[in-house]
């Protein structure tokens, strides 16, 4: 795992996690978005913790007590490949929308891990799940063309979300 830092400016802690397996084509969208967003944001996300993980359960220990956790993952909802979605888990209905939303290649989903983190007293203050609709989850490297286009849009969204929280300062996320 790599990190670009551990303690953001002004006391705000942002964690950006890209979930996925880059050896399963579009399933690797999450880590690609996280990496691209960190590059796009430059110094503003320099102090955010950027974590590539292969499964949502790996978020525990990384996102604990953060002001904002942005989790990026490839999804299969039936939408057009490359479609980018945003779900706030901490808003009413957010966890229910994502939890048990269908089969996951990861076993436990992000919402399940968020609920577990609450039980452990280690949940992030806010959690944004950015989904990129996948097309090809077979073995192999490289993203499909529509997912690659979605990655660019998702990276821009991630940067906007992080900047909003970092600009607001501590306790206002």
Image: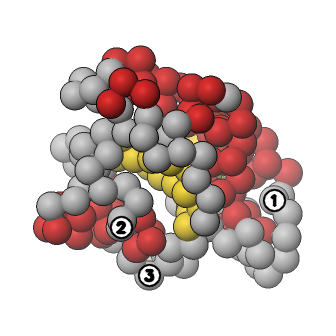
Q: Are marks 1 and 3 in contact (CB under 8 Å)?
A: no
- Residue 126: image location, x then y, percent: 29, 42
Q: Name the residue under label 1.
A: 143
- Residue 151: image location, x then y, percent: 71, 45
Q: Answer few, some or many: residues within 10 Å of disc 1's Cα (few below 14, many 20 plus, some between 14 and 19).
A: many
Gap in Å between the C-alphas at discs 1 and 3?
A: 22 Å
Q: Which of marks 2 and 3 is in front?
A: 2
At a point 62% along the width and 59% down the height, the residue shown is 2
Residue 60: mark in rendering:
2
At a point 84% along the width and 76% down the height, the residue shown is 140
Query: Which one is nearer the viewer's eye here, 131 or 38?
Result: 38
Q: Is residue 31 left or right of residue 111?
A: right
Q: Disc 2 or 3, which lies upstream in sequence? A: 2
Q: Mark 3 points at which residue?
A: 107
Gap in Å between the C-alphas at discs 2 and 1?
A: 27 Å
Describe the element under mark 3 as helix, strand or loop. Answer: loop
Say if residue 59 shows up in the picture: yes
Q: In this view, does 135 lie to the left or right of 140?
A: left
- Residue 158: image location, x then y, percent: 55, 36
Describe the element under mark 1 as helix, strand or loop. Answer: loop
Image height check: is 153 above or below 94?
Answer: above
Image height check: is 35 above or below 75?
Answer: above
Q: Is residue 126 left or right of residue 154?
A: left
Q: Disc 2 or 1, which lies upstream in sequence? A: 2
At a point 50% along the width and 73% down the height, the residue shown is 55
Q: Quadrant of residue 1?
A: bottom right
Describe the element under mark 2 as helix, strand or loop. Answer: loop
- Residue 86: image location, x then y, percent: 46, 41
* Quarter of the picture holding the C terminus: top left
Q: Nearer the viewer, mark 2 or mark 1?
A: 2
Residue 101: mark in rendering:
none
Q: Answer few, some or many: residues within 10 Å of disc 3's Cα (few below 14, many 20 plus, some between 14 and 19).
A: few
């Amino acid at each position: 795992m790599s990190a670009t830092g551990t303690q953001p400016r002004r006391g705000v802690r942002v964690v950006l996690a890209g979930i996925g397996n880059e050896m399963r084509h579009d399933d690797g969208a999450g880590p690609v978005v996280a990496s691209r967003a960190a590059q796009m944001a430059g110094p503003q996300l320099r102090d955010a913790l950027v974590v590539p993980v292969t499964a949502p359960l790996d978020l525990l220990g990384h996102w604990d007590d953060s002001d904002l956790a942005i989790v990026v993952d490839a999804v299969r909802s039936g939408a057009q490949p490359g479609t980018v979605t945003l779900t706030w888990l901490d808003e009413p209905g957010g966890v229910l929308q994502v939890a048990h939303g269908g089969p996951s290649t990861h076993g436990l989903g992000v919402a399940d891990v968020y609920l577990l983190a609450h039980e452990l007293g280690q949940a992030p203050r806010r959690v944004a799940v950015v989904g990129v609709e996948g097309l090809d989850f077979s073995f192999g490297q490289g993203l499909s063309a529509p997912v690659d286009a979605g990655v660019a849009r998702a990276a821009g969204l991630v940067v906007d979300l992080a900047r909003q929280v970092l600009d607001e300062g501590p306790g206002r996320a």
